[in-house]
Image (cartoon, rainbow, N blue to C red):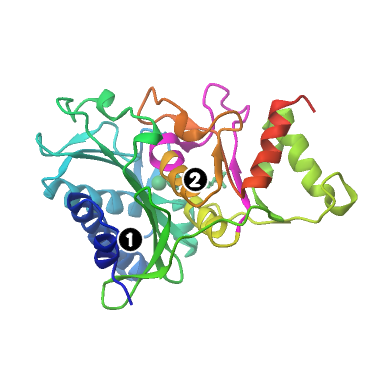
Amino acid sequence: MQLLSQFLKHQKTDEQLVDLIATLMVACKEIALQLREGELAGVLGTTSNTNVQGETQKKLDVIANDVLKKLLLDNPLVAGLASEEEDDPVPGNPDGRFLVTFDPLDGSSNIDINVSVGTIFSVLERTPGEDPALHATYLQNGRRQVAAGYVLYGPSAVLALTTGRGVNFFTLAHTGDFILTRENIKIPTQTREFAINMSNQRHWEPAMKSYVGDLLLGSDGPRGKNYNMRWIASMVAEVHRVLTRGGIFSYPWDAREPAKPGKLRLMYEGNPMSFLIEQADGIASTCYAPIMDVQPAEIHERVSVALGSREEVEILLSYHNTEK
Ligand code: AHG
Ligand code: MN
Ligand code: MN
């Protein structure tokens, strides 16, 4: 039985990074506790506020954001943070080393129906001298992440973590420790499972329509095999399934808001998930380029996402590269 802290030490992870990850896990444990109490703690339902994304904030979006913010700002290693639920970056210790970007509660439409949600985080190193109160300080591409992960609050709470040396799962025990439960995750290269919000089909690009159309034809179509579909509406849960048994997940650009490249956010969802997926030998793409190569122009920027089993994502990309 190996604790998260022992595992990271064993991997010779930078001690300050271990310290920061420990802080993130204290926050996630607190969020897990609040979620478990649910209605008993009066934490379900919505607030009267909307966030910078124009989405109505759930009470738990705000609670999770406040828990993470407080604990991270108490850690002197944190120079600043950017959150899906904060309009602007929040500066921390002016001498701090790390910048943390996060989606405090992903899949929050699932809260009130008691279905899985998660916390997604990404850790960057501040370029010395840059001001953590400024948006520009955070605009690093995904290749510069030093750690990323999520905690899935499902039947059990599971941390998926990468520090650039593979992906490992840790399960939250009743003792409050995260314990290594699956080591060196590798995504199967092929799959028969896809996840996409089919109700948006009419808004997609022709390439995506054509790719999914061929999946739906099953063994009668060019793919020659039958596919199954899943949609949990919680990216953390979808990515956890992909990491665990393979699959392809996409939230692509669509024509409803043509100026935005999709629904998901590059710095809070796209980049951290892409780091995990690539570290597990999968592909994470905008359908035209690796997500982690996208240079962010704005902290709340959106990105088109297609990720998962290598061979399946490559086929999806081929539909985008050739006119079909
Ligand atoms: P968030 O709750 O942080 O706003 O993110 C929700 C995201 C993502 O988790 C999920 O894949 C997607 O939105 C679900 O979208 P639909 O509502 O279109 O199903
Ligand atoms: Mn989210
Ligand atoms: Mn969220």
Q: Secondary structure at mark 2?
A: helix
Give the residue type that dot 2 points to. Glu
Residue in view at x 74 percent, y 42 percent: 212
User: Is residue 45 in view?
Assistant: no
- The answer to which quarter of the image holds residue 5 is bottom left
Q: Is mark 1 within 8 Å of ligand 3?
A: no
User: Which of the two labelled residues, at mark 1 and mark 2, occupies the earlier sequence position?
Assistant: 1
Residue in view at x 66 percent, y 34 percent: 317
Label at residue 278:
2
Give the residue type that dot 1 points to. Val
In this picture, is 314 found above or below 190?
above
Label at residue 43:
1
Give the side of residue 206 with respect to residue 187, left or right. right
Label at residue 14:
none
Residue 248, magenta (yes or no): yes
- The percent position of residue 44, horizontal first and vertical second, equals 38, 60
Most distant residue in the right direction: 220
Give the magenta part as a residue range: 246-270
